[in-house]
Image (spheres, coloured by chain):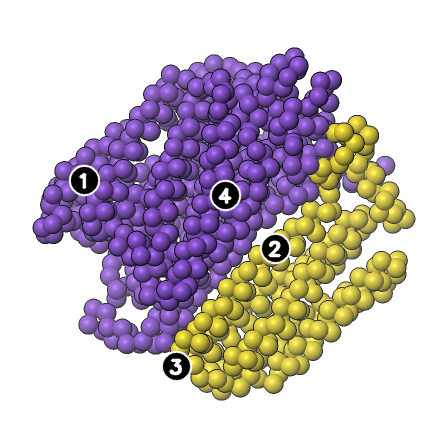
Amino acid sequence: MASEAHAAAHVHVHEAPRGFIRKYIFSTDHKIIGIQYILLALVAVFVGMFLSLLMRLHLAWPSLEIPFFGLMTPEQYLALMTMHGTIMVFFVLTTAPQSGFGNFFLPIQIGAADMAFPVLNMLSFWFTFASFAVMLAAFFVSGGAPTSGWTAYVPLSALGEVAGPGLGAGQTLWVVSIAIFCGASLMGSLNFITTTLDLRTRGMLLFRMPLTVWAWFVTAILMLLGFAVLLAAGILLLLDRHAGTSFFIPGGLIVSDRLIDHKGGSPLLWQHLFWFFGHPEVYIAILPGMGIVSHVLSTFARKPIFGYRAMVFAILAIAMLGLGVWGHHMFMSGMSPYSAIAFSLLTMSIGVPSAIKTFNWIGTLWGARIRFAPPMLFALGFVSLFVTGGLSGIFLAQPTVDIYLHDTYFVVAHFHIIMGVAAIFGMFAGTYFWFPKMFGRAMHEGLGRLHFWLTFIGVYAIFMPMHYIGLAGHPRRYPDTTAVKFLAALDPVHTFMSIAAFVTIAAQVLFVLNLVWSLWKGKKVGINPWEATTLEWTVPSPPPHDNFAGHYPSVYRGPYEYAVPGAPQDFVPQHLPEAEPARHAGADD
Amino acid sequence: MAGKTAVEELELIDAGRPPRDSGGAGDFGGRRPTPAVPQVYVTGIWLALASILMFFMALTSALIVRRGLSTDWVPFDLPPLLWWNTAALLASSLTLETAHRALAAGRPLAYHRWWNVTTALGVLFLAGQWMAWAQLRAAGVYLATNPSSSFFYVLTGVHGLHLLGGIVALLYVATRRRRAAPWPVERTAVTATSIYWHFLSGLWVFLLLLLWWGR
């Protein structure tokens, strides 16, 4: 039966590859690719954290000579700031929660053998890797890393070396790296959406998908639309830098005593294009965290998620509104007050689905007998941070308030809490929750708890005072305020935040030690250590190469059937056929 | 193999999985849980088109904003050759559709012939675009001459790159044909390539009107 063999060969019957390179380096297995993404993000997060450590040292002790670095110049400070933001946003917040955990768990949670396009998946990772390498190379070229911020605002980013160190080769590498990253993200998101639409197993209706899958799916849609726009903007920026065009560069600029010979371009055009991507990017970072947190809260509260459908529609609403609010990053750009009001109203309306989510998380916890394991602690921490960061967001959504606060530390505090730290807490929750599934061993609980409390108190100690110095009028992006008299009173706050940052960074070493220790010495676990309901807990830990060994599960129920009355256990996995007692009014209603 | 129908092939692919009635409560939430399903290629190509459309819409809005804001926009005459190129590209969409229908009607020879004509027309379009660029260069209109010419080169350039991808896809399907791939696989590749090609034809008409309006 030659044709049968042919058909079989085409079905990707998942023969596990044997060679090291095919198995671990250029792998097409979604689980290996997921781990590769997570490792890349882990390296990136430590690079990014190291940069913030240097910045915090300089902010608290401006005249300090840092070993191997010397006295920091303002340009060096801005370069650190730019690279910290870029590396954290692209290579950590976009990479780990979506591409990392999503790759590993989306196919398993919907009962598929792999992603829809395994080779594209592999390419997507290696594009990301190349992009990261190019980005890091910017540190080592003449002039060093760019200083135009992670938003690469024009004209600073478009003029080349004449505008300052780092804006020549460094900035070019930055744009090229981001363009490669766009390509990687487009391939990845296309794969996520197709897999979710087409490869769900029998009975896995859309409204039976775990909220993690919903979050990854909607995030992928945002990536597919957003990164295409960023790519277009990047190409135009490269042409302005190297081909003499004037898309963004205005006329009559005199920089370093030289008349710039471009004319007529619009720096605002860059801001519109960038933020059309940049605002959805915020949701790209946070939505997967929301999915993970919903999943973990339900599991450890031993209750169905409160209002499953409302949660799904809230994700969709956040994503849709998120595509229409980019202008709130530009209230300071001199935009018409009428457009500002439109952007402002749309922005504040995102508060509605966000409040629905928060309400439902609290509803899930209400009256629950909570199991306070490390994943749950981080999920609860996420909810706390999301509320804190969300409230300061309502301040900033109003143009009149934003005009005062926009260039102060208040904004820094806001976006670090909601986009940075909350998303990181989502990743921690995911790591502690899924580590047993990924490697067959549990992480150390005591260390996990210690890591949580140090980090939770630490991040509040770093970022809460930032709100206050922002309200007091402390501008952001200033490397050194010793010459500014009215800010002298805030110096002790800077010192406090810096010390808090060092302690928090040290606490992350605990996390890495726990990771490495648990890989070899962690307690061995069975298939379902958390007594959870979704499909990833029906396969061995770690899952075999083809996930289900050809026996695809059928799904009979929603994803969060905990505390089912009359059931033999307090949870009913998704793949169990209809039980005798009536279905619990929960996830699927 | 040549005599196998699509349905028979799909049943072969389906073998080795539990029978349909063992499904969850009789409903069929997703489709088949293996990457071999031709459906994924069709879904994938539509998603790619959504993304490509966003890419070109970003450039379009950039053109509209840049033109509306500036006082330095100098129109230039589009090379008349572009209309011939457009005719070639639209014709290629027609021949592709003819090929597609020939395939569906089980006339492989006609299908092969029209497929090759489509590829040739695609190459002709690209060559024509290249010549249009050369004419503009000869007239002293370069990439950085004026924002109007910048957008002309950028839009035609990135459209050309996408079309080059389409030609690679057409050739790929042609080589698969020689290697006598199974029927549903070939048909999937044909469908996906056709969707992409028609999209690029339509996109070109839109871009041409945009450039003509903004010349």
Q: x and y percent of residue A273 in the render?
A: 44, 61
Whether callout 4 and callout 2 share a subunit is answered no
Q: Which chain is yellow?
A: B
Q: Is residue A363 above or below residue A79?
A: above
Q: Label 3, label 4: how many angstroms apart (C-alpha)?
A: 43 Å
Tell me the kind of residue under disc 4.
Answer: Pro
Would you name the residue on which mark 1 appears?
A: A494
Determine whether, in the image, residue A277 is placed left or right of residue A416: right
Label 1 vs 4, first from the N-terminus: 4
Would you name the residue on which mark 4 appears?
A: A353
Would you name the residue on which mark 2 appears?
A: B48
Q: Which residue is at a point 41% across and 33% down the rendered structure image?
A: A382
Q: Which residue is at a point 33% across and 24% down the rendered structure image?
A: A453
Tell me the kind of residue under disc 3.
Answer: Thr
Crowding near the residue tagged with mark 1, few <14, some 14–19, many ≥20 C-alpha atoms within 10 Å: many
Crowding near the residue tagged with mark 2, few <14, some 14–19, many ≥20 C-alpha atoms within 10 Å: some
Residue mark closest to the camera, 1 vs 4:
4
Tell me the kind of residue under disc 1.
Answer: His
In-front residue for pair B64/A154? B64
Chain letter for mark 3, please.
Answer: B
Would you name the residue on which mark 3 appears?
A: B71
Quadrant where the image shows the N terminus of chain A: top right
